[in-house]
Amino acid sequence: MRAKTPSFIAEFPLRTTAADEVALSKRLAAARQIYNASLGEALRRLALMRQSKDWQHACRMPKTVMDEQSGNRIANKERSSRFRKTQERFGFTRDSIQKFAEACRDACSIGDHLGSHDTQTASLRAFQAV
């Protein structure tokens, strides 16, 4: 069971004009489209990466190995290195998904409604979800 922290929810009505509502609606729709595109691309790359022989070989490697000096078990650096190289090879990194999102934004009218920071934030959240 999670520990409860004191919290509350407050709702405040926005006083907007019709033009504000249209602009806000367009920005939210653009952010949703960037998020969904980033999520789809990240899931696609993840599936391809997991199908690769390098990834499957790394999965079969032991997670820990015996340290010869101390006799303790330590993380298998070779395994971690293989995973990292495979992620980079398939472009499954935070930065590559952000670049993909920026390319999507710049390829259509979404760039008229969404800035660089908003695009990066939406793509980062999609990547973290995967």
Image (cartoon, rainbow, N blue to C red):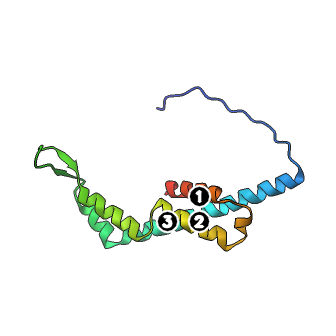
Instruction: Give the mark nearer the N terminus: 1 vs 2.
Output: 2
In this rendering, is residue 90 above or below 71? below
Query: How many neighbours does mark 2 have within 10 angstroms: few (below 14), some (14-19), or many (20 or more)?
Result: many
* Viewer-side residue, 109 vs 7: 109
Instruction: Give the mark nearer the N terminus: 3 vs 2.
Output: 3
Marks 3 and 2, how far apart at CA: 9 Å
In this rendering, is residue 87 above or below 125? below
Q: Which mark is drawn over residue 96?
A: 3
Q: Regarding mark 3 in the picture, which secondary structure is present there?
A: helix
Whole-percent x, y for residue 63 in the image: 25, 54
Residue at 29% x, 61% y is 81
**Is 116 positioned to the left or the right of 58 in the image?**
right
Query: How many neighbours does mark 3 have within 10 angstroms: few (below 14), some (14-19), or many (20 or more)?
Result: some
- Residue type at mark 2 is Ala
Q: Regarding mark 1 in the picture, which secondary structure is present there?
A: helix
- Residue type at mark 1 is Gln
Q: Regarding mark 2 in the picture, which secondary structure is present there?
A: helix
Q: Which mark is drawn over residue 120?
A: 1
Residue highlighted by disc 2: 101
Q: Which mark is drawn over residue 30?
A: none
**Is 8 positioned to the left or the right of 77 in the image?**
right
Assess whether mark 2 and mark 3 are in contact (beta carbons under 8 angstroms): no
Quadrant for residue 72, please give it: top left
